[in-house]
Image (spheres, rainbow, N blue to C red):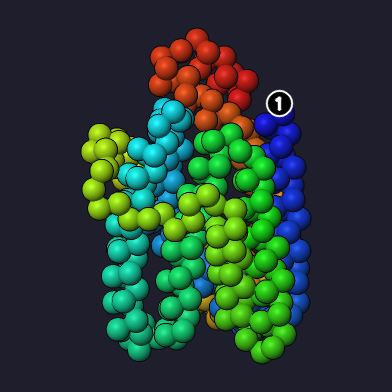
């Protein structure tokens, strides 16, 4: 119950900050600017889910089992993170080389690239905090990211950066949260000394989930791209504002119980304490 209450407070604060950002940005940006901002954030979200969400899920699955030797799983996670970042870099480099064909602004493509990597690293940081039963660090990461994104985004927009200012604020919020409150923000690349068994477990568990995460994200976001193509980018703004507002009200509360229960259930499952697992699953239900 204390963990559930802690995550309730965290997610409630997240919801308030996110709704405040939604309200402010939708008033100081034009419909075209907000529509462009929503599409670019959606693009970065899709890429982060494709390249990094599987790694976050694998950390959540196996970290409790290696809680006495966390260095093993963190070295494996670091190597997987850098491999995923290489994939993002190649994809974004190709997009930048063909930006005229794709009708994309090079600066927007660069921002998408940086946001994708920062969002992937931030999601991993949240997962580690949850797996370590550290709701306070989870809180500091998420509240710092949201509040810094709002404040810096407003400043950049005020000085004429429009939707790119909002994107830059989003990026700075991610970077600040990671750098200040993550114990190992850089996730140093380990050339050797990586436990092959741990890496294999993470890859076998996480990679098949890529299609699952991608399908979920695309179902949530593809409609914005369809509206932009069929009706115009200005129509994306009212749609995404209404959609995100409902998501911010309902989604966080459904996630609270999972955040508090999943690490314990995972640990008990690996310890083969199946009766205790069943009890916790009933409580979660």
Position above or below: 49 against 39: above
Q: What is the x, y in percent for residue 281?
A: 55, 21
User: Residue 124, relative to residue 260: is it above or below?
Assistant: below
Provide the secondary structure element on which disc 1 rests.
Answer: loop
In this rendering, does residue 166 appear at all?
yes
Q: Looking at the rendering, in which quadrant would you find the N terminus?
A: top right
Residue found 48% across the figure and 63% down from its top: 118
Q: Position of residue 242 (x, y in %)?
A: 68, 63
Asked whether, in this view, residue 195 is left or right of residue 34, the answer is: left
- Report the residue marked by disc 1: 1
In which quadrant is the C terminus drawn? top right
Q: Nearer the viewer, residue 51 or 282?
A: 51
**Residue 174, quarter of picture:** bottom right
Task: Name the residue rendered at 68%, 55% in the picture.
Answer: 143
| Nearer to us in this view, 107 or 241 | 107
From what the image shows, is residue 145 above or below residue 62?
A: below
């Amino acid at each position: 119950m204390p963990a559930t209450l802690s995550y309730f407070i965290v997610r409630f604060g997240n919801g308030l900050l996110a709704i405040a950002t939604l309200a402010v940005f939708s008033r100081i940006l034009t419909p075209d600017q907000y529509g462009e901002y929503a599409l670019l954030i959606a693009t970065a979200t899709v890429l982060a889910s494709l390249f990094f969400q599987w790694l976050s899920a694998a950390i959540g699955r196996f970290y409790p089992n290696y809680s006495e030797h966390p260095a093993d799983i963190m070295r494996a996670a670091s190597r997987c993170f850098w491999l995923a970042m290489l994939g993002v870099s190649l994809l974004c480099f190709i997009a930048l080389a063909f930006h005229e064909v794709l009708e994309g602004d090079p600066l927007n493509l660069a921002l998408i690239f940086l946001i994708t990597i920062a969002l992937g690293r931030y999601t991993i940081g949240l997962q580690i905090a949850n797996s370590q039963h550290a709701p306070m660090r989870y809180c500091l990461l998420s509240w710092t990211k949201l509040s810094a994104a709002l404040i810096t985004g407003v400043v950049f927009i005020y000085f004429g950066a429009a939707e790119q200012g909002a994107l830059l604020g989003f990026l700075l919020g991610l970077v600040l949260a990671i750098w200040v409150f993550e114990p190992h923000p850089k996730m140093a690349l380990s050339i050797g000394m990586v436990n092959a068994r741990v890496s294999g477990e993470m890859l076998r568990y996480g990679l098949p989930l890529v299609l699952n995460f991608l399908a979920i994200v695309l179902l949530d976001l593809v409609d914005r791209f369809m509206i932009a193509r069929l009706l115009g980018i200005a129509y994306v703004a009212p749609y995404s504002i209404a959609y995100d507002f409902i998501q911010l009200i309902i989604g966080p509360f459904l996630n609270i119980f999972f955040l508090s229960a999943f690490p314990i259930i995972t640990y008990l499952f690996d310890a083969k304490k199946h009766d205790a697992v069943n009890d916790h699953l009933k409580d979660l239900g």
